[in-house]
Structure formats: C-alpha cells, structure tokens
Image (cartoon, grey):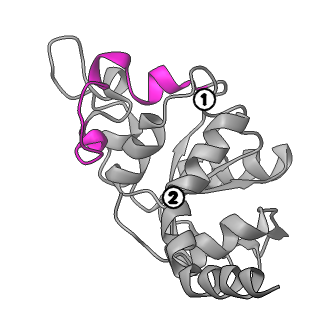
Amino acid sequence: MPKVKFDILESTCVALPFENVDTDQIIPARFLSATSRQGFGDNLFRDWRYTKTGEKNNEFVLNKPEYTGKVLVAGKNFGSGSSREHAVWAIFDYGFRAVVSSFFADIFMNNALNNGLLPIVISDDLLKKLLSLVQNKPDTKVKIDLEKQTFTILSTGDSVKFGINPYKKECLLKGLDDIDFLLSMKSSIIAYENNKSLT
C-alpha cells in the first residue's frame, strides 16, 4: 500500500446510501487470489458496478461521472462480514482516502486504520443529511482535519469532532504503517536497550 500522509482533506463525496454493506459486497471473494494490493480498486463493488455480462451498470453511483471525490459516504454498519483486509485495499486503491458512516464493523475499522484509510463516525442524523446533500448536489464538499479531528460540511457549516486512536492518528499524519513506525523509533529503542544493559 503506498505511503500517503493524511492531514487536511477537502473533497467532494460519493454517496452509497445502503446499510449493512459487507466485505463480500465491497470486494467479492472470487477476486481475493491476487498477491499484490494494487488493482483491487478495479473490482470495488464489482457486482453492483457491472452486470453479469460484464457491462457497466449506469445506475450505480461509481459509474455516474457527476459523483467523484476521495470521500465515500456509506450507510450504517459498513464493512460487516468477513475480516478480509482486501476490502480496505479495494477502497483505497480506487482512490478513496476516507469513509464516513454512523457505524463501522470493528475489524473493518482496524483494517482501515492499518492501511491508510480514515474511517469517520458521525451521528445517524448528520449522516442522513450528508447522504441527501451529496445525492442532490454532487458538488457538495467536506473538509476533514485529522490534526484537529474535525469533519465539516462546507456548504452548511455543520462541523463535528470525530474520535481516533492516538497512535493510529500519528501513523496517518506521518504516512506510516506499524512496521514503519517501529523503524522510525529504532534509534530510541537501541538507546533504551543500551541504557538497560548498563544498569
């Protein structure tokens, strides 16, 4: 997964107003055999984006040119089902950098944070408002400030704070995964071990 620092993101959104979207709908199991994380975005929501004969479903939001952006706005309980990390890979590889919902499955949320995708939880009421805005006005923009942990709908001024694990926040801000973070602490770890051996 490419290392991408996340600080402030202003973007239009793509609305997916379905509840209980599971990981098999995000990336069907038949596409999980690839060994590289790249290319999964081609099959994001594959069975919704394409017909059984392989033609584009022009009614699905990802196939509508007016809906673009780096923020996916999804219905409640997004990412349920199996624990496959490939679901996050597909969303990230497609170009999304944040997913907004009123509830995420725990494993999906952890997988997202481990792979540079920011999951943001907002209230049910604000989610309904945002979904309606995006569907009716595709140019609706939001602003995500990770440092301040704020999510703002720019056209309405609605702004809320969102929660995030402090360690994962630091990793996202610096564009690090768990291994990168440990490597960045290498000199401190060596110094600690050296001091420990002297006592």
Give me the residue at 56% from left, 21% from top: 82
Q: Which one is in front, 155 or 107?
A: 107
Q: Residues within 10 Å of mark 2 (few under 14, many from 20)?
A: many
In magenta, the rendered stretch is 21-42
The relative height of residue 108 versus residue 149 in the rendered view (above or below) is above
> Does residue 191 appear to the left or right of 182 in the view shown?
right
**Residue that mark 2 sits on:** 13
Amino acid of disc 2: Cys
**Quarter-wise, where is residue 193 in the image?**
bottom right
Residue occupying the point 77% across, 69% down: 166
**Compared with residue 23, is residue 114 higher up or lower down, i.e. above or below?**
below
Viewer-proximal residue among 7 and 34: 34
Q: Is residue 116 visible?
A: yes
**Residue 35 occupies quadrant:** top left
Classify 10 Å Cα crowding around label 1: few (below 14), some (14-19), many (20 and above). few
User: Which amino acid lies under the numbered mark 1 shown in the image of this protein?
Assistant: Phe
**Mark 1 and mark 2 in contact (Cβ < 8 Å)?**
no
* Left or right, 37 with reference to 6: left
Label ID, residue 18: 1
Please state, as top left, top right, bottom left or bottom right, where the C terminus lies in the image.
Answer: bottom right
Quadrant containing the N terminus is bottom left
Q: Is residue 33 magenta?
A: yes
Q: Total of numbered circles in the picture?
A: 2
In the rendered image, the vertical position of residue 117 relative to residue 19, given as above or below: below
Q: Which element type, helix, strand or loop, lies under badge 1?
A: loop
Identify which residue is drawn at 50% across, 63% down.
179
Answer whether residue 143 is visible to the viewer in this image: no
Q: Given the current orientation, which residue lies at the most extreme top position?
A: 52
